[in-house]
Image (cartoon, rainbow, N blue to C red):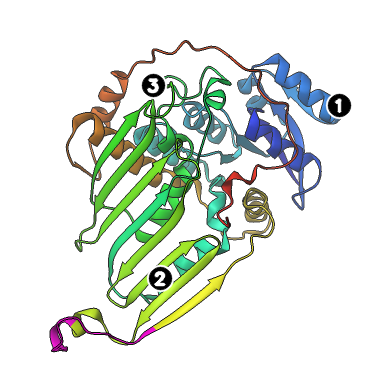
Amino acid sequence: MLRYAVIGVGNMGSVHAAKLFGGAVANAVLTAVCDIEEEKLARMKELFSDKVAYFSDYHKLLDSKEADAVIIATPHYLHPVIATEAFEKGWHVLTEKPAGVDAGSAAAMNEAAKKSGKAFGIMFNQRTNPLFSTLKYYLDLGVLGEIKRFVWIISNWYRTQSYYDSDGWRATWKGEGGGVLINQCPHNLDIWQWMMGMPETVHAVCIPGHFHRIDVEDDATIFAEYGNKATAVFITSTGEYPGTNRIEISGTMGKAVAENGQLKLWLLKRDERVIRDENPEAMPKEPVCEICIPFEEKGDGHINILQNFTDHILSGKELIAPGEEGIKSLTISNAAYLSSWKNRTVGIPFDNSEFLEELAKQHDTRREKKANKEADPVSEYSDRWRVNW
């Protein structure tokens, strides 16, 4: 039986804790929770009574022997800080996304994980979605040939002003280190690089407070290039309703579209480059094989990651989302911010010191206060991560 502690029992951490306490993860049990806010700890005590240990200081939790693995669900800046200390004290670590705010701190965290020899995972629950995993499978098989273009419009992250006003750290450079790219989109940026690999250059426009009264971006467009001249376009927003969640990938042997819970493939019988060079017609009509694969979302990706992480520690099962890979999506968002701030194309890798220098120039003008009481802990994960709609 693997014993878990949860540090940070706000919206996500409280659900992780409730699921573990309720036995949703086989061979796992909740034995401790930690939060600096007394009100949140009090709510946890109402749910779990004296069956778990309670801490208001994560240092004391990590010094204790109350658990074997820790889930980090704190504000973003603290993810690498707490993870590094946990590794140094012999804990297994599963962190919420993002890996941190800057790629440099994530790299230091990865090094600490490597030195510790302990398990390290990140809550990239979208990797368990069968639509995305199947699309990646076909891409890895090469059914689309050489990739030409990747386009993802992911604007179904709609949020109200009330959401942003619910806590002082939300939508601030000081609290979150960014907006939609670093809060909502680490999952999507991870799926992008998981399927396509890391781009070589990024040019982005990130618009702060475009649709809300916030200081960070709620609208972003990224244009990226790969070494083989393939391109990628990533468009996201929290200010469009109804939004869109659509991936389209074009290759020399056809194209794929993932949308509304379906994966559609249009496959050519011969490479487009052969058609280009050998077909005498100016606008030929080549035979195309059309395939449509519907998917039904079953279970929950968060539970899948928790179960996989547990099984990895107890029986050596391969991790679906190794924590070390969190730096990849963070690198893309960092590059996008740097590009937007400097109004230039940014290469990957880039100078992390330059990023930190520019990040330090970003100031929050919103008053950091709780305008609305945070919702009580819930026992179910939100359906906002689902793509089948």
Q: Is residue 216 left or right of residue 160?
A: left
Q: Which residue is mark 1?
A: 49
Q: Residue at x 28, y 53 (%)?
A: 199
The rendered magenta stretch, by its main secondary structure, is classed as loop
**Residue at coordinates 63% horizontally, 35% vertically from top-left?**
12
Q: Position of residue 156 (x, y in %)?
A: 49, 45
Q: Which residue is mark 3?
A: 215
Is residue 280 covered in magenta? yes
**CB atoms of marks 1 and 3 within 8 Å:** no
- The magenta-colored residue range is 276-288
Q: Residues within 10 Å of mark 1 (few under 14, many from 20)?
A: few
Name the foreground residue: 99 vs 229. 229
Q: Amino acid at mark 3?
A: Asp
Q: Mark on residue 99?
A: none
**Location of residue 381 (image quadrant):** top right
Label 1 element class: helix
